[in-house]
């Protein structure tokens, strides 16, 4: 028994350790993971499942419907009816009190209903198909949104990691400068102001490093939520910011045209038009007659005592076949009014379809402009960073040779730090704007 307990504890401990190890993901793997496991993706799949069930529910309206019914009645006090007494040889004008029926009654029936024709049902079948298409389009749009969200979250984590590395490198350089400057001051060859200026710069960079570390922790948790992972799970990102920026530069996208019929937003607007068209047909169909049939089988039992479960209980069977035809004749123009309202909604949907086309064109033009600008800004920030590094190095040499002031050195350092962050942000912008352009073009997920 003791060995079994130790074995169980060992298995649980092993599971707990493995659950804390986390996972390693490239950007592509992260996108694939998010498309399968994110909370939005899971619910989008459930919406499609629900739409399929709804479609079948609508279909079953026109299929045979069978129901069973069992009624039992116990007359605690039977109802009394009055019958003219003269029927039984009594006086004219007098009434005899009669109790009809038995104290216990039981009826069992089975009914088969079948819809033969109903215009509303035919429209309903078409509407169910459109509803399923709407759910499928919603899932496609959700998937595109997940892809962009994962890319942005992944990029933000990389940005915070790269920022921390640069800030730590800057702190090492500043601490070295501060030490050398302080030695010069103590030997009487420098000013105290130079030391204080470097202390201010160092404190500022350390504060920025502390803030960035906290932001990195938040960025990781945001990525986990986007992926559908528990927020405290350790995730290792295998791609680098620079690598992704280089891979996401594709100038050919700037000349790619938009195909409206393939864009999910256009398909959603088109399905809205179809839905409103079907709503108008639904109102028109209500002017058509409806035809249905039914067949009923039943057994009835009666008695002064509850003997229905005994073999000698007598049962009386019955059956009924019927057809029902309902013809709308006049509704005081209510049907016409509802049809006209549905027609107006259809015209609005058609106008919105045209509006969607124009919005998609504007969205694409905006996405292309921002993407093109981010590529240009990336190249510019790369050049500016190289210049800022050379300027800062020259100012360091001049400062320790006594040619320039501490203020000039601090200015060159601040300029360098700004250019470093601009360069990191430029790489992130390429990745994010490429994702936005892919969405504007409705680039398929498998690409």
Image: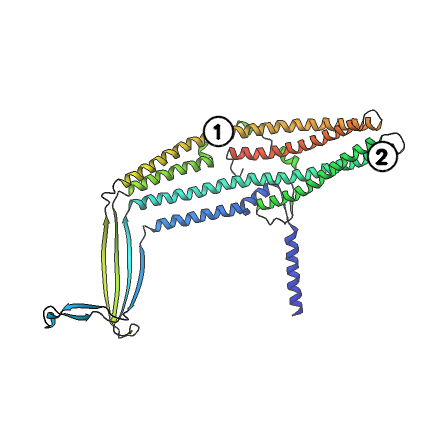
Residue 26, quarter of the rendered image: top right
From the viewer's perspective, is residue 204 above or below residue 325? above
**Quarter of the figure that contains the N terminus:** bottom right
- Residue contact at pointers 2 and 1, CB within 8 angstroms: no
Residue denoted by label 1: 361
Report crowding for label 1: few under 14, some 14 to 19, many 20 or more residues within 10 A (C-alpha).
Answer: some
Picture residue at 51% right of the left edge, 31% below the top: 363
The disc placed on residue 109 is: none
Residue denoted by label 2: 182
Which of these two is toward me, 150 or 418?
418
| Residue 315 coordinates in the image, percent (x, y) | 25, 69
Residue 75, quarter of the rendered image: bottom left
Picture residue at 38% right of the left edge, 38% below the top: 274
Determine if residue 239 is in view: no
In the structure shown, which secondary structural element does the residue marked by tag 1 occupy?
helix
Horizontally, residue 253 falls left or right of residue 109, namely: right
Q: Nearer the viewer, mark 2 or mark 1?
A: 2
Horizontally, residue 334 falls left or right of residue 225, namely: left
Q: Which residue, as the protein is rendered here, is positioned at the far front?
A: 93
Horizontally, residue 298 falls left or right of residue 259, namely: left
Picture residue at 85% right of the left edge, 34% below the top: 182
| C-alpha separation, residue under disc 2 versus residue under disc 1 | 61 Å
Picture residue at 85% right of the left edge, 30% below the top: 191
**Quarter of the figure that contains the C terminus:** top right
Horizontally, residue 182 falls left or right of residue 143, namely: right
Sequence-first tag of 2 and 1? 2
């Amino acid at each position: 028994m003791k060995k079994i307990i130790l074995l169980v504890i060992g298995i649980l401990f092993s599971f707990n350790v493995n659950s804390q190890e986390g996972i390693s993901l490239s950007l592509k793997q992260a996108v694939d993971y998010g498309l399968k496991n994110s909370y939005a993706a899971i619910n989008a799949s459930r919406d499609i499942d629900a739409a399929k069930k709804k479609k079948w529910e609508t279909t079953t309206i026109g299929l045979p419907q069978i129901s069973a019914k069992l009624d039992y009645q116990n007359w605690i006090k039977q109802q009394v009816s009055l019958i003219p007494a003269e029927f039984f040889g009594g006086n004219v004008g007098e009434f005899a009190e009669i109790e009809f029926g038995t104290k216990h009654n039981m009826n069992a029936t089975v009914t088969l209903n079948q819809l033969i024709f109903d215009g509303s049902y035919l429209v309903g079948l078409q509407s169910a198909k459109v509803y399923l298409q709407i759910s499928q389009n919603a899932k496609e749009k959700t998937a595109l949104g997940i892809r962009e969200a994962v890319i942005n979250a992944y990029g933000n984590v990389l940005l915070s990691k790269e920022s921390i590395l640069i800030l730590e490198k800057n702190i090492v350089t500043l601490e070295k400068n501060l030490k050398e400057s302080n030695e010069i001051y103590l030997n009487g060859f420098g000013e105290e102001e130079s030391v204080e200026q470097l202390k201010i710069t160092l404190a500022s960079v350390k504060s920025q490093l502390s803030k960035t570390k906290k932001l990195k922790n938040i960025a990781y948790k945001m990525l986990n939520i986007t992926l559908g992972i528990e927020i405290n799970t350790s995730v290792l990102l295998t791609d680098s910011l620079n690598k992704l920026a280089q891979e996401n530069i594709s100038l050919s996208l700037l000349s790619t045209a938009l195909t409206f019929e393939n864009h999910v937003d256009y398909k959603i607007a088109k399905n809205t038009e179809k839905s409103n068209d079907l709503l108008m047909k639904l109102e028109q169909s209500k002017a058509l007659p409806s035809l249905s049939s039914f067949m009923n089988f039943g057994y009835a039992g009666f008695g002064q005592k509850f003997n229905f479960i005994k073999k000698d209980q007598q049962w009386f069977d019955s059956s009924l076949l019927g057809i029902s035809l309902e013809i709308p004749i006049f509704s005081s123009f209510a049907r016409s009014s509802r049809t006209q309202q549905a027609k107006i909604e259809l015209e609005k949907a058609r106008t919105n379809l045209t509006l969607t086309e124009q919005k998609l064109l504007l969205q694409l033009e905006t996405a292309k402009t921002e993407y093109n600008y981010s590529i240009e800004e990336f190249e510019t920030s790369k050049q500016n960073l190289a210049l800022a590094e050379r300027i800062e190095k020259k100012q360091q040499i001049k400062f320790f040779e006594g040619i320039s002031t501490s203020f000039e050195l601090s200015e060159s350092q601040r300029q360098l730090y700004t250019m470093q962050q601009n360069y990191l942000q430029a790489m992130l912008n390429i990745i994010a704007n490429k994702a936005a352009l892919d969405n504007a073009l409705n680039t398929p997920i498998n690409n």
